[in-house]
Amino acid sequence: MEIYFTPYAEDTLAERSIDKELVLKSIRDPDEIIDGKLGRKVAHKVIHKKLLRVIFEEEGKSYKVITVYFTSPQRYMKQ
């Protein structure tokens, strides 16, 4: 599986000081994947009591990361 990042996602990682390895782990071994808007997918991974949300598109056997951010697990995770 190839995972690549849009320029916007690369900028977001730098601005928010998010380690790219955490994003890769979130896609490869998510706590859950849900449907997002515009046919996109959202990978959820709880890390140190925060929820990492990775918005991505599937393109064949590749994944294109659109954006990434941390938020509260209570807001998005199914309990």
Image (tube, grey):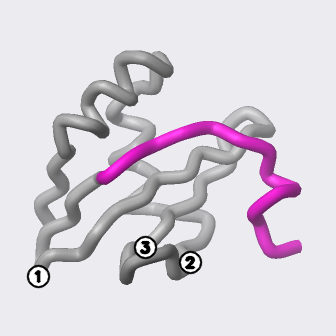
Residue type, numbered disc 1: Gly
Q: Is residue 36 left or right of residue 38?
A: right
Percent x, y of residue 1: 15, 67
Q: Which residue is mark 2?
A: 34
Quadrant position of the C terminus in the picture: bottom right
Residue visible at 18% across and 55% down in the picture? 3
47 relative position to 39: left or right: right
> Is residue 24 or residue 36 the one in the foreground?
36
- Residue at position x 38%, y 74% in the image: 40
The residue lying toward the viewer, choosing from 26 and 34, is 34
Q: Left or right: where does residue 2 sit relative to residue 70?
A: left
Instruction: Tell whether label 2 touches label 1 (CB within 8 Å).
Output: no
Residue stretch in magenta:
66-79
Distance, label 1 to label 2, CA atoms, is 18 Å
Q: Residues within 10 Å of mark 2 (few under 14, many from 20)?
A: few
68 left or right, relative to 52: left
Helix or strand or loop: what does disc 3 sit on?
strand
According to the image, label 1 marks what residue?
60
> What residue is disc 3 on?
41
Q: Position of residue 50 (x, y in %)?
A: 74, 39
Relative to 30, is 20 above or below? above
Rounded to the nearest whole Å, what is the CA distance between mark 2 and mark 3? Answer: 6 Å
**Is there a contact, CB below 8 Å, between mark 2 and mark 3?**
yes
Q: Position of residue 63 (x, y in %)?
A: 21, 65
The residue type indicated by label 3 comes to: Lys
Q: Identify the residue shown where x is 13% and y is 69%.
A: 62
